[in-house]
Amino acid sequence: MAGEQRQEGERSNEKVVQIRRCACVVKGGRRFSFTALVVLGDQRGKVGWGYGKATEVPQAVEKAVKGTNRKALSLKLDGTTISHSVSGRYGAAQVVLIPALPGTGVIAGNTVRAILEQAGIKDILSKSRGSTNPMNLVRATMDALSKLRSRDEIARLRGVTL
């Protein structure tokens, strides 16, 4: 389930970040439903996340994987790290991503680590502040990654040559 390949042609790996169980009390007892938060990436700069709800765990994961394409990002990596420090926010969760030297590894919590590893980032420092809710951390991390700009892109926007 976690980390397996979906199709042989695609090199996308999925990582299940969180599975929640919800109970609805009915006349005959409890009826359970499950939600899955999944991160999917090709480890070459493309990463997305999805959220699915179903009555069984595998179906919830499948629905979440289908939703990852709508919320996917393509990143320009600077070797094995990012090009500059960036901060992202969603709700009460704030994530700061800082580039690191080769050999540092991914210094991050479980939720942020899942996204960074699926994106193919191998050397990075991170700090999360505020809420530790996995859904908000995923959205804050994706917000931070969406703010990344390459040197060429910034030079083009400013109208200068490097």
Image: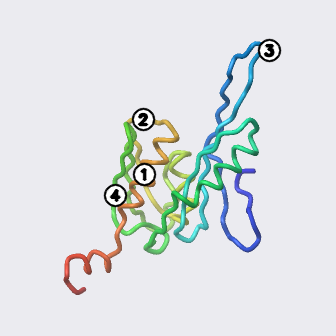
Real-space Cα separation, disc 2 to disc 1, in angstroms: 15 Å
Image position, residue 118 (x, y; %): 58, 60
Most extreme residue toward the front is 27
Three-letter code for the amino acid on which mark 3 is drawn: Gly
Most extreme residue toward the right is 28
Badge 4 marks a residue whose secondary structure is strand
Instruction: Tell which of 133 and 6 is nearer to you.
Output: 6
Does 71 appear above or below 28?
A: below
- Which circle's residue, 2 or 1, is located before the other in the chain? 1
Kindly check if marks 4 and 2 are in contact, taking CB atoms under 8 A apart as contact.
no
Kindly check if marks 2 and 1 are in contact, taking CB atoms under 8 A apart as contact.
no
| Mark 1, residue position | 126
Instruction: Tell which of 28 and 11 is nearer to you.
Output: 28
Kindly check if marks 4 and 1 are in contact, taking CB atoms under 8 A apart as contact.
no
Badge 3 marks a residue whose secondary structure is loop
Image position, residue 77 (x, y; %): 45, 71
| Mark 3, residue position | 28
Instruction: Tell which of 62 and 13 is nearer to you.
Output: 62
Q: Residues within 10 Å of mark 2 (few under 14, many from 20)?
A: some
| Mark 4, residue position | 86
Q: Residue at x 55, y 66 (%)?
A: 120
| Mark 2, residue position | 131
Q: Quadrant of the C terminus?
A: bottom left
Does 150 appear above or below 113?
A: below
Image position, residue 9 (x, y; %): 73, 74
Real-space Cα separation, disc 4 to disc 3, in angstroms: 51 Å
Real-space Cα separation, disc 3 to disc 2, in angstroms: 37 Å
Q: Nearer the viewer, mark 4 or mark 1?
A: 4
Real-space Cα separation, disc 4 to disc 1, in angstroms: 10 Å
Badge 1 marks a residue whose secondary structure is strand
- Asked where in the image residue 131 lies, by quadrant, the reply is top left
